[in-house]
Image (tube, rainbow, N blue to C red):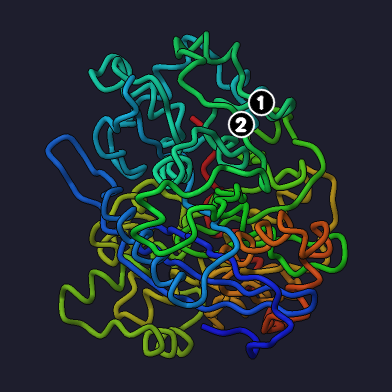
Amino acid sequence: MTTTPPSSAFASAFAAVDLGATSGRVIVGRVGRENLDLTEVHRFPNTPVRLPDGLRWDVLALFQGILDGLREAARSGGVTSVGVDTWAVDYGLLDVDGALLGHPFHYRDSRTDGAAARLRSRVAPEELYGITGLQHLPFNTVFQLAAAQGTAQQKAARTLLLIPDLLIHWLTGSIGAEETNASTTGLFDARTGAWSEDLLRRLSLDPGLLPPLRAPGDPAGTLLPHVAAYTGLDPRTPVTTVASHNTASAVVSVPATEPDFAYISCGTWSLAGLELDAPVLTEESRAANFTNERGIDGTVRYLRNIMGMWLLEECRRTWERENLPAHLSTLLADAARAEPFASLVDPDAPEFLAPGDMPARIRDYCARTGQRVPGNQGAIVRCVLESLALAHRRALRRAAELAGRDINRVHLVGGGSRNDLLCQLTADATGLPVVAGPTEATALGNILVQARAAGLVGDLADMRRLIASTQHLRHYTPRGDTAAWNAAAARLAPAPGIP
């Protein structure tokens, strides 16, 4: 993909390793003072593997995909540096020799069921939130560690590395923990920006398990000799720490040029919220299940995780297996013609978390809640997208209330920004103008942090001005019947709070 025509004004090229829940890419970004160009040089699948003990990431295949992508980047003309971003919360454990102890678990594995309840005797949920500011999600790293307590792997572990930090370790040999991803673990102090040693002690976790923190822009090392030899990159090529939680990178590239904006990073998950200067750690915020995660330059991503395009992606996978039409453009056209508000679901309902037959689960939910059961694919897709738009509305309005902020505009970035129907429905539901794009928000944020480390761009506002001036953005104004949206919102059950 190319967002602007190549130009001799481009000063440097940067390789973004960007791993999502279903695929990974290596994207080369060429950055100049007023230019920004992206080229995807390699894409590879991210296919979890179910083993006898649970669902695991095939992290070795992912690393091979990264190496192949960096080799393609070298063939395209070389790169100034490399940055890595992935999803959050999952981790690998290293033994005393630095060897990986088994493939990392997938956050959708069921081993964490009940883990949060087991921790309550050690740290009350109110106190845990007061330290970490983290939304309760059953797969948070702290709960994964609780589920693994007493296992042979955890007993043998000497170092815990979150997924991007593990991949950087394999590229460079260095050990560290990037702070935007560290803030998602439930082990990070939202006020101090450091690991909470008191919390670790109370949870019977060795503080030495967690490596020193790094900030976006910090150097993470240079390529190991065998990595350089395989990829063809100069062995002196630096790996730069970026905002390694992919949502944090996506928020970097929100093209906001005015205050009072909200953002939705929409992909497999929808992350909807505000950018703040300080965390909101009130009991009211905890009860509403909002999270305070680290952004770049000390900012706070105050948001709620919403089950996003996962529902639609799982529907399409099911239909493909059943040899039913699954082309997205056809499904969206059918959804646009379907009856509005015929049925609605809460995207965050627990039955939608695991992989499987999503259309059947949606129909079961509608039947259980006394609604019309969607009878065809278009009706199911309409149900998913209207429900997601209502979840966006609910999260943004509540975030504004809890943070004492106004919202004048919504920026919807990521893969969901390509979905015209979802963008329009989000504008209609929220009653706010929506700016859609950039689609490649995560890769752009990754690349711009590298470019800033190289001295090519300035502060966060400067990065966002460059995004706004170079990327294709689409604008949606609210339309339709406000009363109908209000009635639909009233029908939808409140978002689940915390256990």
Tag on residue 194? 1
Quadrant in the rendering for residue 382: bottom left
Assign a secondary structure to mark 1: strand
Position above or below: 117 against 382:
above
In the shown orientation, is residue 283 left or right of residue 469? left
Dot 1, crowdedness within 10 Å: few (<14), some or many (≥20)?
Answer: some
- Residue 489 visible in the snapshot: no
Number of callouts: 2
Q: CA distance from mark 1 to mark 2?
A: 8 Å
Which residue is the site of mark 2? Answer: 213
Quadrant in the rendering for residue 67: bottom left
Query: Which residue corresponds to the image point at 29% horizontal and 82% vertical from the top-left?
Result: 326
Horizontal and vertical percent position of residue 374:
34, 74
In the image, which is nearer the foreground, mark 1 or mark 2?
2
Position above or below: 343 against 116:
below
- Residue 78 visible in the snapshot: yes
Horizontal and vertical percent position of residue 81:
58, 59
Contact between marks 1 and 2 (CB within 8 A): the answer is yes
Three-letter amino acid code at disc 2? Answer: Leu
Position above or below: 146 against 59:
above
